[in-house]
Image (cartoon, rainbow, N blue to C red):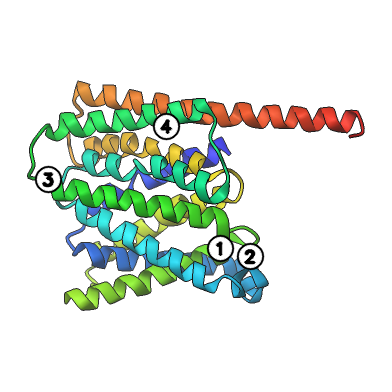
Amino acid sequence: MVLLLTLSVSMVSSASILITISVSPSLVKVFWRTLYGSLFMAIIGAIRGDLSKLRSPQVRNNWPWLIGIGIILSLHFSTWFQSLEMTSIPASVVLVDSSPVFTAILSTVFLGESLRRRSWIGIFVAIAGAIFLVWIDYGLELGALAGDLLALAGAVFLAIYFIGGRRYAQGMPITVYTSIIYLVAAITTLGFCLLGGFNVLVFEPSEVLIFIALAIFPTVLGHSVNNYLLTKVPAYVVSSAVLGEPVGATILAAVILGRIIEPAELIGFSVILIGVAAVLADIASKERIERSKLSFDDANGT
């Protein structure tokens, strides 16, 4: 699980860079990312023979919820992509990845997955690191406030998306679940594009390559892996691990865009990683205890 979490975080970290170097409007980027993502996951599903499960009870009985989750994903991407045009990459990414607080609360209320004290401490340590990063990036400047608020809205939508995945991805192949969710998100975003008067027919080779990269790396290898993990571990675990994204995104921004990483940013990253590590260590400890109890019960025939 830790290796998959590491893969998903490293892949998702590429999203902000790809979004930034694209010259297309934000909603157009969202449309093509989700459309290609749905296509790629459907192809993988067809190769694996998963698409026959589209007629399964898990899909038929949950269509309204799946559509709702797809709409939420569109809103998450739309608000976050726009925020990247209005604020810095570190500020936008750390704010949108503040979702663990909302995920933890929603998990407790709707899924009954209560957190232990150490997990709560880890989450708030990571959030403190995120807040510190935003503060050193902009201080009290209000010019990027709208972008920051959009990123925060994206965090709320991301938390709802994680909760939905934890609840409704169970019992169906992840290729089927993500194909549906991404397609609904693409259709929803297409509606936003038409309402906003944006031309989605973008076939410039460099832009198409960026859209495909967005679909493959942060979507198929990032979000789809996260959705699979949501069927295995509590939503707040996946959400907390994603807090490592600002570190990867800022490193990539330094390498690809030539952005200099300030010493204070390194402090913020360290605080975030300490918080993430605390949550993951706590869940690992909890799983070891549960396995030990099961082994003890089996040994005693209970």
Numbered disc 4: secondary structure: helix
Q: Quadrant of the N terminus?
A: top right
Which is more foreground, mark 4 or mark 2? 4
Q: Earlier in the sequence, mark 4 or mark 1?
A: 4
Q: Earlier in the sequence, mark 4 or mark 3?
A: 4
| 30 vs 61, nearest the viewer | 61
Q: Position of residue 245 (x, y in %)?
A: 36, 39
Q: Residues within 10 Å of mark 4 (few under 14, many from 20)?
A: many
Mark 4–mark 1 Cα distance, whole angstroms, equals 30 Å
Mark 2–mark 1 Cα distance, whole angstroms, equals 9 Å
Query: In this rendering, is residue 172 above or below 157?
Result: below
Residue identifier under label 4: 123
Q: Earlier in the sequence, mark 2 or mark 1?
A: 2
Which is more foreground, mark 1 or mark 3? 3
Label 2 with label 1: CB-CB less than 8 Å: yes
Q: Position of residue 166 (x, y in %)?
A: 55, 53
Residue identifier under label 1: 175
Numbered disc 2: secondary structure: helix
Q: Is residue 198 in view?
A: no
Q: Amino acid at mark 1?
A: Thr
Mark 4–mark 2 Cα distance, whole angstroms, equals 37 Å
Residue identifier under label 3: 144
Residue identifier under label 2: 48
Q: Would residue 231 be found to the left or right of residue 137 on screen?
A: right
Q: Position of residue 175 (x, y in %)?
A: 56, 63
| 239 vs 223, nearest the viewer | 239
Mark 4–mark 3 Cα distance, whole angstroms, equals 25 Å
